[in-house]
Amino acid sequence: MRPHVTVELSVDAGTDAGITYGPAERSRRVVLPQCYPLPGRWIVYTGGHHVRKPMCLPVQVRADGNEALARIPVGAAC
């Protein structure tokens, strides 16, 4: 992601899954705050998806006033 943008990732409460970022506990929603001073560069955050069984995991992504649904293959095709 770009360093000047805050990104929110979330999974639906009806999905038996969660997401994490850094040392945080499993959650349904994670906010990756903007950081500085890395203008013009991309940054990567370490995190993961937690599922009880293989699935095509729908993750809602919100950033910079935009919203999209990403489908993440976690042990199963999407």
Image: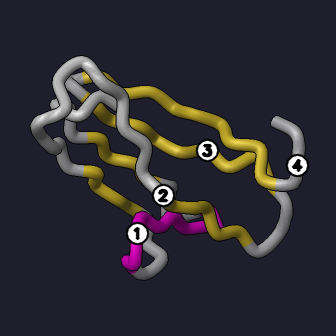
Q: Mark 4 points at which residue?
A: 76
What residue appears at the point 64 percent right and 69 percent down from the top-left corner? 50
Q: Mark 1 points at which residue?
A: 22
Q: Are marks 2 and 4 in contact (CB under 8 Å)?
A: no
Secondary structure found at label 2 = loop
Q: In this view, does 19 lie above or below 73?
A: below
Q: Residue 11, how many percent across, how many down?
A: 50, 55
What residue appears at the point 31 percent right and 46 percent down from the top-left corner? 8
Q: Residue furthest top?
A: 40
Q: What stretch is highlighted in magenta?
A: 15-24
What residue appears at the point 83 percent right and 69 percent down from the top-left corner? 53
In primary-sequence order, the first of circles 2 and 1 is 1
Secondary structure found at label 1 = loop
Q: Do the residues labelled 2 and 1 touch (CB within 8 Å)?
A: yes
Label 4 and label 1: CA atoms lie apart by: 25 Å
Q: Which of marks 3 and 4 is in front?
A: 4
Q: Residue 13, how many percent across, how many down?
A: 49, 64
Q: Name the residue under label 2.
A: 46
Q: Which amino acid lies under the numbered mark 4 shown in the image of this protein?
A: Ala
Secondary structure found at label 4 = loop
Label 2 and label 1: CA atoms lie apart by: 6 Å
Q: Which of marks 2 and 3 is in front?
A: 2
Q: In which quarter of the image is the N terminus?
A: top left
In primary-sequence order, the first of circles 3 and 4 is 3
